[in-house]
Amino acid sequence: MVGSRSPEPGGTSSVPEVGTRPDPERIAEGWEHRFVATGDRVEEMVTLYRELGFEVVTDPVHREGMDEGCLTCFSGGLEYRAIYTRRRKRPDHRSTEGG
């Protein structure tokens, strides 16, 4: 099971502790683990998230970052990528000119 989200009390969502695990360094840098994809879907999602105003990075998914139950699906020879996003920092629009 990869990347499914379940509602929590208060209307928030969380990624379950099943499947691939997000990179703790990425999370510490403010990135949100979205999901894992392969093939053309990766570039489609990168393009979509950028159009929505996000910074986007993808990382290869390594076997050591998976739960045992997911190894079968990920052993088919495809290159899976973990997609992370974070909001772009907005530029400061304050004028420096005196008035």
Image (tube, rainbow, N blue to C red):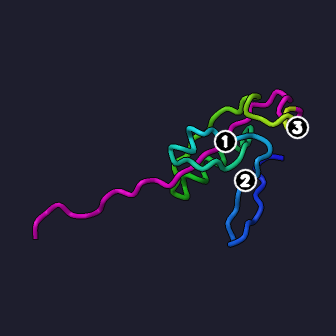
Would residue 49 appear left or right of 63 to someone viewing this image? Answer: left
- State the residue position of label 2: 15
Q: CA distance from mark 3 to mark 2?
A: 16 Å
Secondary structure of the residue carrying tag 2 is loop
**Closest to the observer: 26 or 96?**
26
Q: Amino acid at mark 2?
A: Val
Q: Are marks 1 and 2 in contact (CB under 8 Å)?
A: yes
Would residue 14 appear left or right of 55 to someone viewing this image? Answer: right
Q: Earlier in the sequence, mark 3 or mark 1?
A: 1
Residue 3's disc is none
Q: Crowding near pointer 1: few (<14 within 10 Å), some, many (20+)?
A: many
Q: Quadrant of residue 74?
A: top right
Q: Residue 73: where, in percent of width, then height?
A: 87, 36
**Closest to the observer: 24 or 43?**
24
Name the residue located 39 percent from the left edge and 58 percent from the top edge.
Answer: 90
Q: Amino acid at mark 3?
A: Gly
Residue 92 position (above or below residue 22): below
Q: Crowding near pointer 2: few (<14 within 10 Å), some, many (20+)?
A: some
Q: Is residue 59 magenta?
A: no
Would residue 47 appear left or right of 65 to someone viewing this image? Answer: left
Q: CA distance from mark 1 to mark 2?
A: 10 Å
Q: Quadrant of the C terminus?
A: bottom left
Q: CA distance from mark 3 to mark 1?
A: 16 Å
Q: Earlier in the sequence, mark 1 or mark 2?
A: 2
Query: What range is drawn magenta here?
Result: 72-99
- State the residue position of label 1: 22
- State the residue position of label 3: 69
Residue 82 position (above or below residue 3): above
Q: Amino acid at mark 1?
A: Pro
Q: Residue 23: where, in percent of width, then height?
A: 63, 38
